[in-house]
Amino acid sequence: MEKFFIIANWKSNKTTDEAIEWLREISKIKDHNLKIILCAPFTALYPLKLLIEKSGLPIKLGAQDISPFPDGAYTGEISARMLKDLGVGYVLVGHSERRRYFGETDIQVAQKVRMALDFEIIPIVCVGEFNQFINILNKLETKELAKIIFMLEPPGAISVQTGPVGQGEAESVQNVVEMIKKMKRFTPASNFFYGGSVKSHNITNFLSQPEINGVVTGTASQNAQEFIKMIENAAKI
């Protein structure tokens, strides 16, 4: 059986010290047959890289965004080459929060996907609905699709941080499976994740579905103990 992916997306949270403490707590977990990816803020990537390498932890680094431009006169941007130098292997692209607060478009998403692929960083392309998925698909080449992971994040399921774990209501498993089946017909070689209020009590509901290759956890992943519970529950499947 292929390993499940569990991705932690801290969003805009955690200082460097807090990030290191989280990783130290996570390092206590027992062996598992999972692929863990940590999408941390840019400011925490380098110290996390050093600690992961020193400790030999089975965790891959991911970024929460990537520049649509190469190195150059683009003040404030973090290029794909910079991320690759930090050991980043995955990147979230087109997250709903990037679209909502920063006006990110499907054209920019496609540009970011290509930048990531040029440096062998795997893009996790976030889509909220079928039409958005088709719009992005139309801007990419067929040969690129097999290298891309798509993450379905229904707008109503995005968790809002109102406590240590966060509140939000996940989409029904049936709706998620039906949507992924529909999308997979257009790109059968791609992997599909689900994201949106995934927590320890519902993670197995999603990962037990053959159509779902992994989950992206947002607010809940910021709590190390909650994330450990998610890993433990997923490892039992």
Image: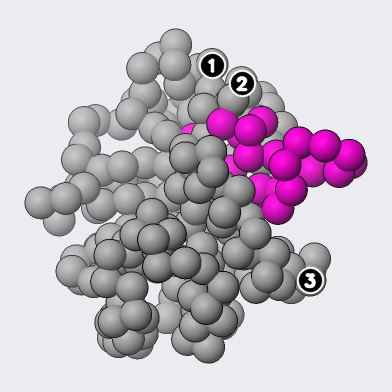
Q: Is residue 138 above or below residue 17?
A: below
Residue depicted at x 34% and y 80%: 186
> Mark 3 packing: few (<14 Cα in 10 Å), some, or many (20+)?
few
Discs 3/1, front: 3
- Occupied quadrant, residue 101: bottom right
Give whichever of discs 3 and 2 has the lower sequence position.
Answer: 2
Residue depicted at x 36% and y 50%: 6
Q: Position of residue 75 (x, y in %)?
A: 89, 41
Instruction: Give the camera-side residue of 167 and 237.
Output: 237
Residue 47 is tagged as 2
> Mark 2 packing: few (<14 Cα in 10 Å), some, or many (20+)?
some
Residue depicted at x 33% and y 64%: 190
Question: What whole-number distance in Å separates the C-alpha atoms at marks 3 and 1?
Answer: 34 Å
Residue 38 in sight from this viewpoint: no
Secondary element type, mark 3: loop
Residue 50 is tagged as 1
Question: What whole-number distance in Å separates the C-alpha atoms at marks 1 and 2?
Answer: 5 Å
At label 1, the amino acid type is Leu
At label 2, the amino acid type is Pro
Residue depicted at x 54% and y 43%: 118
- Occupied quadrant, residue 50: top right
> Is there CB contact under 8 Å for labels 1 and 2?
yes
Q: To which residue does mark 3 refer?
A: 103
Where are the magenta residues, as a range?
A: 61-84
Discs 3/2, front: 3
Give whichever of discs 3 and 1 has the lower sequence position.
Answer: 1
> Is there CB contact under 8 Å for labels 3 and 1?
no
Question: Quadrant location of the C terminus?
Answer: bottom left
